[in-house]
Image (cartoon, rainbow, N blue to C red):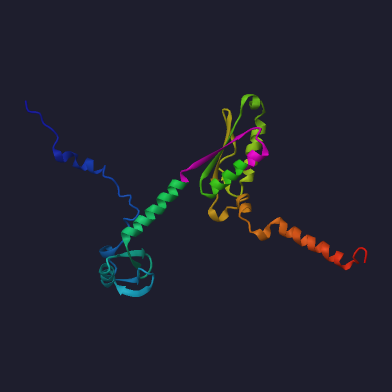
Amino acid sequence: MATSFPSAGGGGNRSGSYQRRNVDPFAAIRRNHRIKVPSVRCISPEGKQLGILETQKAIALALEVGLDLVEVAPNATPPVCRIMDFGKYVYEEQKKTSHVKSTASKIKEIEFSARIADGDFFTKIRHAEEFLGHGNKVKLRLKFRGREMAHTEIGFAVMTRGVSELVGMGHPDAPPKLIGRNIHVMLTPLAPNKRKPKFHPLENSPAVDDGPDLSGDDDDDHDEPAAGKPAAGA
């Protein structure tokens, strides 16, 4: 008895539904012969305004020097196009995005103890500030040892102090939380223009702002009245 099988064309429509969507962020940028408007405002590779040109003439200018005519402001009237190396432009943009993602994905961890000394505490805070300054997220973690779990409030005080010391560089995603024998808090860096380092600027401050210069002025102030007095034995 003959067995019938579905025809090859029967599953064609179904397989079409699994086609991968184009997620290329640069695919929507019109360039060269994809630019359909009759005229464009053209910019040279050096950024010089070439004025309003017929689109075909602008494309010819770009191709003449081995470059592309790329639409950079499609909503303008007429659209603004620039002559550039589109492949190089895409490469540079992808490189920037990749760098930002790799930096943002890095989480640095700083570990404290409940009875940490002030010197060690501020050393760790300096490291955390530096990481936040580089755009990294920073996880502060405090680990309780032995009977320290009986006084978790000491640990919370250390973590709250740490967060407050770094308030100019990052903000906590949530309040410090006790998980098992550890207190965790994640800090996200502030926007670069809002960061106010508390520790590192002191290392790079100009010499004119140092204390010895001010104390030198005080010595001069004390010397002037003394100059007006008669010298001893005069």
Identify which residue is drawn at 21% across, 43% down. Answer: 13
Identify which residue is drawn at 34% across, 67% down. Answer: 81
**Residue 110 belongs to the span the image colors magenta:** yes
- The answer to whether residue 141 is left or right of residue 31 is right
Residue 214 coordinates in the image, percent (x, y) = 74, 59
Q: Quadrant of the N terminus?
A: top left
Frontmost residue, 61 versus 66: 66
Q: Quadrant of the C terminus?
A: bottom right
Residue 36 coordinates in the image, percent (x, y) = 27, 66
Quadrant hosting residue 208:
bottom right
Which residue extends farthest left? 1
- The answer to whether residue 105 is left or right of residue 23 is right
Residue 47 coordinates in the image, percent (x, y) = 39, 70
Frontmost residue, 19 versus 199: 199
Which residue extends farthest front? 233
Where 93 falls versus 167 (above or below)? Answer: below
Q: Is residue 58 visible?
A: yes
Residue 161 coordinates in the image, percent (x, y) = 65, 41
Identify which residue is drawn at 60% across, 50% down. Answer: 200
Q: Which residues are magenta?
A: 104-122
Where 40 falls versus 13 (above or below)? Answer: below
Which residue extends farthest right? 233
**Residue 103 belongs to the span the image colors magenta:** no
Quadrant hosting residue 45:
bottom left
